[in-house]
């Protein structure tokens, strides 16, 4: 039996099995197996004929990467052509976007790479070659922007969410608060800081046995952590926790009440590419979600260049700033002078651990 058939069998068994106290152990095991097979499908073991997904030939450039995901004809190309310098073909028929078109969005001095993935990601979870590439690219995103058609039903979003979920991408979700460490000996030691609602020693040990892990420390620090969370923790290297912005296009074609209802959903913005409504709000929301800040670097005796900001992640330290300037800069680092919101007085002399703020001016003094 192939892996796809095994997956299907488990899915069928899961949908047949009633959820209750007596079956939770069995369901937990099935979910663990399902995650293991899905993983094998996405990343075949070395030596097998199918190649792993290596992403498209799109190198990650710029300050951040936003990946667009959506069904065909929802308006991804229209959006991309409005906000980036790369034009992609717009047609009245489906599947226009066959390859990913990297475009660059310039905003607040930052260069944000926008990648449009092929129409739909379905097939990715079935291990189809192209789907795997899509997944690999989506996993490198700083933000996933799910483009949805406001005139279509809620299932378009559910289908895409389920697809992303099944390939190990978690949307708008923090990493589970479970400590997990594989050991060389000593068996499985299960502990919880307060009684867990869904996890226990028996379920966790059984799932670990299925993964051929016989010695490990497990400490559940969140009483609401689920079996899925535990499976995610075991598979941590294959999971990506990515922010997602839901963008509903074509709001010109639905009623005001419907627009109002959609716009109130969390992490959601609405737009109409055709009428050029809300497109700028989407860009602002992308910037906000990316959590980027601008810094101005200053050389001694020279005014900083306020037209050329350096873009780093929010809460970056001087150490991270050095790394983004040059690989070796930290080796020569003596101290930094900082002017701006993060400085107690201007300039403040700081070390590598100082956390910078938006629009700070930074001068690195070398040894
Ligand atoms: N009513 C309405 N139609 C729109 C809007 N934006 C795009 N469209 C139409 O929707 C169709 C598809 O737009 P595209 O931008 O090609 O969509 P896409 O998501 O890139 O499609 P694929 O390339 O097939 O993945 C075109 O006929 C557009 O004219 C909008 O805001 N309102």
Image (cartoon, helix red, strand yellow):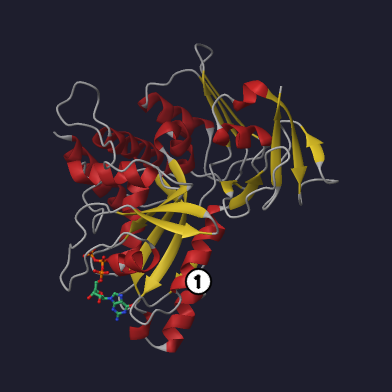
Where's residue 14, x and y in %?
31, 48
Where's residue 239, x and y in %?
42, 39
Residue 166 visible to an observer of this rendering = yes
The outermost residue toward the top is 185
Where's residue 16, x and y in %?
28, 52
Is 197 rendered above or below residue 201? Answer: below
The answer to which quarter of the image holds residue 337 is: top right
The answer to which quarter of the image holds residue 218 is: top right
Q: Is residue 242 left or right of residue 345?
A: left
- The answer to whether the beta carbon of the residue marked 1 is less than 8 Å from any atom of ligand 1 is no
The outermost residue toward the front is 301
Q: 47 and 327: which one is in front?
A: 327
Q: Is residue 79 left or right of residue 194?
A: left
Helix, strand or loop at disc 1?
Answer: helix
Indicate the quadrant containing the C terminus: top left, top right, bottom left or bottom right: top right
Residue 356 visible to an observer of this rendering = no
Report the residue at 67% width, 53% height from top: 359
Is 233 rendered above or below residue 110? Answer: above
Q: Residues within 10 Å of mark 1 (few under 14, many from 20)?
A: few
How many numbered discs, if any? 1
Is 157 rendered above or below residue 133? Answer: below
Find disc 1 in the rendering and name its residue. 281
Report the residue at 34% width, 78% height from top: 250
Indicate the quadrant containing the N terminus: top left, top right, bottom left or bottom right: top left
Q: 44 and 14: which one is in front?
A: 44
Q: Is residue 283 left or right of residue 313?
A: left
- Ligand 1 image position (quadrant): bottom left
Where's residue 234, x and y in %?
45, 31
């Amino acid at each position: 039996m192939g892996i796809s058939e095994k997956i299907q069998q488990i899915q069928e068994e899961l949908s047949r099995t009633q959820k209750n106290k007596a079956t939770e152990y069995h369901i937990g095991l099935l979910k663990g197996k399902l995650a293991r097979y899905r993983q094998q499908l996405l990343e075949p073991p070395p030596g097998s004929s199918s190649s792993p997904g290596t992403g498209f030939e799109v190198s990650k450039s710029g300050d951040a990467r936003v990946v667009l995901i959506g069904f065909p004809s929802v308006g991804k190309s229209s959006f991309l052509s409005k906000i980036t310098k790369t034009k992609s073909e717009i047609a009245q028929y489906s599947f226009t976007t066959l390859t990913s078109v990297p475009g660059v969005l310039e905003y607040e001095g930052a260069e944000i790479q926008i990648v449009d993935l092929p129409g739909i990601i379905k097939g990715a979870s079935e291990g189809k070659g192209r789907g795997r590439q899509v997944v690999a690219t989506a996993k490198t995103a700083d933000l996933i922007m799910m483009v949805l058609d406001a005139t279509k039903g809620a299932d378009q979003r559910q289908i895409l969410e389920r697809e992303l979920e099944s390939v190990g991408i978690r949307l708008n979700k923090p990493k589970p608060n479970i400590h997990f460490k594989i050991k060389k000996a000593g068996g499985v030691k299960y502990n919880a800081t307060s009684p867990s609602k869904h996890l226990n020693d028996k379920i966790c040990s059984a799932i670990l046995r299925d993964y051929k892990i016989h010695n490990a420390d497990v400490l559940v620090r969140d009483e609401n952590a689920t079996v899925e969370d535990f499976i995610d923790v075991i598979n941590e290297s294959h999971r990506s926790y990515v922010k997602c912005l839901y963008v509903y296009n074509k709001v010109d074609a639905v009623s005001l009440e419907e627009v109002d209802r959609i716009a109130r959903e969390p992490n959601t913005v609405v737009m109409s590419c055709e009428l050029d409504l809300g497109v700028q709000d989407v860009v602002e929301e992308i910037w906000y979600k990316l959590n980027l800040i601008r810094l101005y670097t200053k050389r001694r005796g020279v005014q900083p260049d306020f037209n050329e900001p350096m873009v780093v992640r929010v809460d970056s330290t001087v150490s991270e700033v050095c790394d983004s300037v040059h690989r070796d800069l930290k080796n020569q680092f003596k101290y930094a002078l900082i002017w701006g919101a993060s400085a107690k007085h201007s300039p403040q002399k700081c070390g590598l651990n100082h956390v910078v703020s938006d629009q700070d001016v930074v001068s690195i003094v070398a040894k």
